[in-house]
Amino acid sequence: MKDEKPYYQTYEVEADPMDRLLDCLNRIRWEQDPTLSYRWSCGHGICGSDGMRINGICGLACQKLVKNFKGEVLIEPLPVFRVVKDLIVDLDPFLEKYNSIKPYLITKSSPPERERFQSPEQQRLFEEAIRCILCACCTASCPINQNKETASYVGPAALVRAFRYLFDSRDEASEERIALLDRKEGAWGCQTLWKCTEVCPKEIPVTKQIGQIKKQIYEIKHK
Ligand code: SF4
Ligand code: FES
C-alpha cells in the first residue's frame, strides 16, 4: 500500500562508536521494523548500493561510523531520483545516462595476437576513474542534476566513465566519444561546482576529470 504523502520516522538504536550507520539500519530492520527498505550488499564500500543522504550529505551508509555523529542522524533517500520505497530510489535514469556515453572499450583495428598492450604510465592516466562504484552520490549531489531545467545533464558519474575510455590508449573511438560529450548535456553541462568531488566515497577527482574532458574536446576541435 502506498502512503499518501512521504513522512519521516524516528527510530532509537543502541550503537557502539565503531558501528557503521549501515549496522544501525540493519538493527532497525532486524529488531524493530522489518518493512524499512534500503539497498546494501557488500557492507564495505565496494558495491555502491547503499548511497543515501546522511545529515544532508550523500554518502555510503557502510562507510559512516557512529562515532562521527552526535545525537539524531537524518537519513534520506538520494535526491534527484524517484523514491521507490523508503531509502530505495529508481536508478534506471542514472544507468541510462551512464549507458549513453558508451561505457566500454571500442576498438576498430584487428585484434592483436596477444593482448592490446598498455604501459603502466598509460594505465595510470585513468587509474583513479576505475575506482568508481556507480553509487550515484555525485550525480545526486550535483546542483545541475538537481535543477529540473538542467536535469538532462548526463552527470558526473557518466563523465567519470567517459573520461576512463577517452584517456585509455587502447580505445579507438575518440571522435565518437567527443561528439557525445561536446554538448551542454555532456561535459559542458558541468559548471565546476565541485559537489561531486566533495562527496565521492572513492575520492575520485571527479571535477578535475570533467575539466580534462573539456580540455580534450577543445584541443581535438582546434588542432
Ligand atoms: Fe560514486 Fe564517486 Fe563513482 Fe560518483 S564518481 S558514482 S560518487 S564512486
Ligand atoms: Fe556496498 Fe556500502 S554496502 S558499498
Image: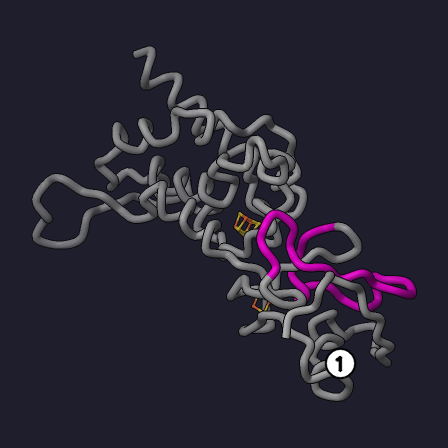
For the N terminus, give its image quadrant: bottom right
Magenta span has 140? no
Q: Where is residue 99 in the image (x, y as percent from the top left)?
A: 36, 48
Q: Position of residue 128 (x, y in %)?
A: 48, 46
Q: Whereabouts is ligand 2, in terms of quadrant?
A: bottom right
Q: How crowded is mark 1: few (under 14 residues within 10 Å), some or many (20 or more)?
A: some
State the residue at coordinates (39%, 25%). 182
Asked if residue 34 lies left or right of residue 203, the reply is right
Residue topped by disc 1: 28
State the residue at coordinates (61%, 59%). 83
Residue reaching furthest right? 71
Residue reaching furthest bottom? 31
Model colouring: one colour
Q: Position of residue 186 (x, y in %)?
A: 44, 31
Q: Which amino acid does label 1 sit on?
A: Ile
Q: Nearer the viewer, residue 76 or 123?
A: 76
Q: Name the quadrant containing residue 194.
A: top right
Magenta stretch: give its range: 57-83
